[in-house]
Amino acid sequence: MRWRGVPLDLLLAVSGVALDLFTTAHAGDTAYLPAEANIPLGLLAGLPMGFVRRWPVPVTLYLAALLAATDQLGSFTSNTAQILVCVAVGVAGFRSGLRGTVVAVAATITATAFNIADPGIAFTANTWMYSVLLPVFPAALGAYLRGSAGPLEERDVTPDALLAAGGVAMTVLSTWTTWHSGSQPVWVVGLLAVVGGLSLGVARRLPGLVLLAQGVLLLCADTYLNEAVNTCVILTLVAVCVFAMRVASWAWTVAAYFAGCLLTSIAVVGEGTGITPFRVGVLMTLVATPVAIGRYLGMRQAAAAAERLRAEEAARAAVAQVRADQLAERERIARDVHDIVAHHVGAMVLRAGAARYAAPDGPVADALSDIRETGHQVLQDLRDLLDLLREPEREPHLLANPADVVREAAERMTAAGLLVDLDLDPATDQAPLTARASAARIVQEGLTNVLKHAGPGTRVSVTVAPAGEGLSVEIRNGRPPATAERPPAGGLPSSGRGLAGMRERVRALGGTLSAGPDGEGGWLLAASLPARSAA
């Protein structure tokens, strides 16, 4: 249950009880019930309205049954039940499906027919039409609001609830003492008062329809219930104000203004009322006031919406500028790397190639060939890296099968002097490509670190095997062959970023990496790569 709607449910229940107390305030004893029964019947009629939002169809059926029962008992609570059952069937049309709405409307039509019918009086076609249209109209209105009305930009319904509550409170409190004095039944006058007030709750969504409804209600009050004319004039002016606030067209606003002037003049000008320019000016000023207030509020809302739009556009522009700056920085880095690193690596490859053709066959020629091939591979990897820097959205191109990369790294390090024992499980080909590519890079970096820090002649075992849906990588090297201190093998520089880079690569996949002494004078590097990267 959504407890944040409990205050509204309590308000509906209290309003239903209060409405019955107003309609039965002047009621006395009936043929079947004493006057003291009005309060319990008011509770029975009003309290179920607290559940109408959650169970509209059952509440409608209950109120229909209560309407028929109170009508047979001659209780004035039947007037309240007739009003509330129309409100409940409207809620059923808004919140329930077609089948539930049809059941609720059918029950309400039957109960309304019982309420209208009098003993000994024939049931005419007009009576049947009245009994059918009275429940069908709120149900159709509820279904229309559910399916066709578009939502407002602002989602806060507090203004709508305040408008509806204020409208109902004003209409009921200002007219309930005169409901018995008109020619119409009490429940008809009460229903019009409640509907007229509730209609303000949808005025922001349907300003034109609500203004039309208030105009019709004002004309009906002027014809059948003069005591309620002033209240209807106030409701009409409120509807004009909301219309001016919600409709941006000046032409429609002017039309609503003249319509408000016409309706107000019909209501306040009687047969003996003299028409003077001063009175006309006062009336037009009176109607112009809510129009001016509505236009002012509408312009404030439009200015706030424009400010939000400008803020959103500024935020998008800032993000685009940051993105452009990042791309420009990437382009600059790519250009500098190409101009500096690619130049030197290219020169190294050319010199190694020239020396290879000049040198005799033997270990020196093999080393020069290896340098040349490695240089070509570095240049190709560098070009792919530069392309990725210039176009971050492109998919990185994998130059070779990760298994071939692992084997090539082991062969290259063997040629450099390490004693590499490679154990590459063929089942690793079933692992995801990202895991296999990361494993290949870890093996490359791990073997390079062994060559740098332990030196040639060190025995290394490399194991790459499946682990669940991912892979496990283990690189273990034994004790260096000589304990004497010496510079890194081959004079290779050490940046100190190799292990940190491997950790970042493994962390990006959601795996784990550990590195440290193995307790036997050697070093152990172990990594676990899952099949799917961490979110």
Image (tube, grey):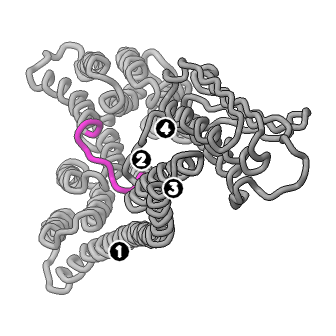
Q: Which is more N-terminal, label 2 or label 4? A: 4
Residue 169 falls within the magenta-colored stretch: no
Q: Split into 4 quadrants, where in the image is the C terminus? A: top right
* Real-space CA distance between mark 2 and mark 3, rounded to the nearest whole angstrom: 38 Å
To which quarter of the image does residue 460 belong? top right
Q: Which is more N-terminal, label 3 or label 2? A: 3
| Residue 268 in sight here | no
Whole-percent x, y for residue 176 in the image = 40, 46
Is 287 on the left or on the right of 318, as rendered? Answer: left
Q: Which is more N-terminal, label 3 or label 4? A: 4
The amino acid pointed to by label 4 is Leu
Residue receiving disc 3: 359
Q: Which mark is residue 12?
A: 4
Give the class, few, some or many, for how many residues have Cα within 10 Å of label 2's Cα (few <14, many ≥20).
Answer: few
Residue receiving disc 1: 303
Whole-percent x, y for residue 507 in the image = 64, 43
The amino acid pointed to by label 1 is Ala
* Real-space CA distance between mark 3 and mark 1, rounded to the nearest whole angstrom: 81 Å
Label 4 SS: helix
Closer to the camera: disc 1 or disc 4? 1
To which quarter of the image does residue 74 belong? top left
Closer to the camera: disc 2 or disc 3? 3
The amino acid pointed to by label 3 is Ala
Name the one closer to the observer, 155 or 255.
Answer: 155
Residue 150 falls within the magenta-colored stretch: yes
* Real-space CA distance between mark 1 and mark 4, rounded to the nearest whole angstrom: 36 Å
Residue receiving disc 2: 396
* Real-space CA distance between mark 4 and mark 3, rounded to the nearest whole angstrom: 100 Å
